[in-house]
Amino acid sequence: MIVDYLEHYSVVLMCRVMGVSKSGFYRWLDRPASLKDQRRMDMQERVKQTYEEFEAAYGAPRLAKELTELGYPCSVNYVAKIMSEQGIRARNGKGFRYSRHSLAMNNVSDNLLWRNFAASKPNEKWTTDITYIWVKDQWLYLATVMDLFSRKIVGWSLDTSMTERLIKDAMKMAFSNRKLEPGLIVHSDRGVQYRAQSYIDYLTSNKCRISMSRKGNCWDNAPMESFFSRLKVELIYAKNYRTIEEAKSGVFAYIEIFYNRKRRHSANDGMSPVAYEEKAAMAA
């Protein structure tokens, strides 16, 4: 919880309120994650993703069954404990309620896309998100910006912390790479970074229209989820990077050389994002 609120309150204040020592917190923060911790973090993400996929309708028994059938065996009690820690419950009547943390939703924008991911031209609709990459004994965080016209990744940023700066750096790259027109829709989930006031001000100052997914609905940002899935299968899991520099070089090569310029995409009539945009430019 202290880590989640580092941008809002001082470490000293939060440690005092929670009755923990500052030195103890920093020791915990710097400790290498064990294999058990890695597996648990991975399962936490899978539980949350499956929960969102099924519209918050599944409780622990159904989630455990679904995950087991997907090849991630787990017990009902294990899933129930993760759900309790994350403050999520199945939406099945009066018993359902969001945690206080999940209700703290400031600066939430309407969903302007409503899963209409088609675009008639470049720089009409963008989508952005963050994913996690495990490197030896720590997490890296990758923020990407995709143009829905061609599915091209037009901006990205990789760092060891998941902050507002991470997503702003990715957006700055995108803005510098493209010719913007007023009214560009920029879609994201409701993550705290995307609701930060300075980030919202940055988008509106560039005459962008902000769109956000509905709560607990990963399919509202399906193209980006699909990209992250391919990235992990085709690169991250296959390479198993041991250093941050290796991971950064690999991500650069995958996005800028392979994915954008070589990888054929079904949404582009079998062409790469760059080839699809070049063809559209010639036809215009």
Image (cartoon, rainbow, N blue to C red):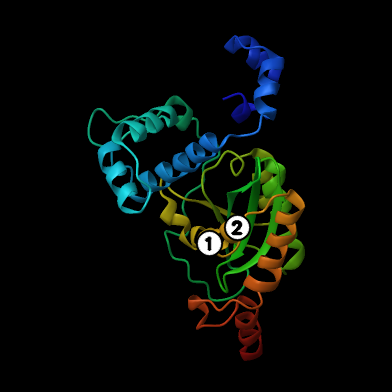
Eyeballing the image, is 14 above or below 127? above
Quadrant in which residue 253 is drawn: bottom right
In the picture of the structure, the residue carrying the numbered disc 1 is 233
Residue at 63% x, 68% y is 123
In the picture of the structure, the residue carrying the numbered disc 2 is 236
> What amino acid type should be assigned to the residue bearing mark 2?
Ile
Residue 99 lies, in percent from the top left, at 41, 27
Quick one: 223 or 84, which is closer to the camera?
84
Residue 11 lies, in percent from the top left, at 69, 19
Relative side of 185 to 217, left or right: right
Quick one: 54 or 110, which is closer to the camera?
54
Marks 1 and 2: in contact by CB < 8 Å? yes
Residue 84 lies, in percent from the top left, at 38, 28
Residue at 73% x, 49% y is 243
Quadrant in which residue 121 is drawn: bottom right
Residue at 25% x, 38% y is 61
Residue at 41% x, 29% y is 87
> What residue occupies the far front of the structure in this picture?
35
Locate the N terminus by quadrant: top right
Locate the C terminus by quadrant: bottom right
Instruction: Calculate the distance from the C-alpha at mark 2 to the C-alpha at mark 1.
Output: 6 Å
Circle 1 SS class: helix
From where the camera sits, is residue 76 visible? yes
Eyeballing the image, is 32 above or below 13? below
From where the camera sits, is residue 9 visible? no
Quick one: 272 or 207, which is closer to the camera?
272
Relative side of 53 to 246, left or right: left
Circle 2 SS class: helix
